[in-house]
Image (cartoon, rainbow, N blue to C red):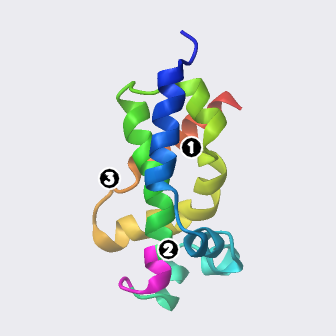
Amino acid sequence: MPATKEDLSLILQMEQTLRPGKAAKAFCWSSEVEGENAGPKFWEKHALDSEERLYVNEYSTYFEQFSVAWERGLIDEELLLDWVPAELAWQRLGPILTATRDLLGHQDLWSGFEALAARQAALG
């Protein structure tokens, strides 16, 4: 079934509510989250209560919230996958988020974001 105006309306409403701030987005696309700075090394440099951790959480939550609507069939998949760059964002933040899961002992954290990114990758 093709996307509807309601699907687009929901995406736009979610965008207005969930869009990460400029500082969070800039940080998540900086060299602070790639290469040697990714994964467990991120946590060696940044405390759990640091501003940097909050930036990563803010940006990741954006994708996680979209994944909730997607996983429950509340939003058109094709439109959503055209809208959000989940795969690209997971490539950047995935190593940090999986290290966070291990650090906190909660393997379900950001599982929706990861699933959305995997779906986007699978569909190319």
Note whether residue 69 is visible: yes
Classify the position of the C terminus by image quarter. top right
Q: In screen coordinates, is 55 left or right of 78?
A: left
SS for callout 2: helix
Residue type at mark 2: give it: Tyr
Residue type at mark 3: give it: Asp
Depth check, front residue: 57 or 124: 57
Tell me the mark number nearer the camera, choosing from 2 and 1. 2
Query: Image point 36% across, 85% down: which residue?
Result: 49
Disc number placed over residue 81 in the picture, else none? none
Query: Image point 50% across, 77% down: which residue?
Result: 40
- Is 53 part of what is drawn in magenta? yes
SS for callout 1: helix
Place of residue 64 in the rendered image (x, y in percent of width and height, measured from the top left): 43, 50
Residue type at mark 1: give it: Ala
Q: Which residue is mark 2?
A: 55
Q: Quadrant of residue 106?
A: bottom left
- Residues in magenta, as a range: 48-54
Q: Residues within 10 Å of mark 2 (few under 14, many from 20)?
A: many
Tag 3 and tag 2, C-beta contact below 8 Å: no
- Is 12 part of what is drawn in magenta? no
Place of residue 118 in the rendered image (x, y in percent of width and height, measured from the top left): 56, 40
Q: Which residue is mark 1?
A: 117
SS for callout 3: loop
Classify the position of the N terminus by image quarter. top right
Place of residue 113 in the rendered image (x, y in percent of width and height, measured from the top left): 47, 48
What is the distance, in whole Å, between disc 2 and disc 1 at their CAs? 19 Å
How many numbered markers are drawn? 3
Q: Which residue is mark 3?
A: 108
Note whether residue 121 is visible: no
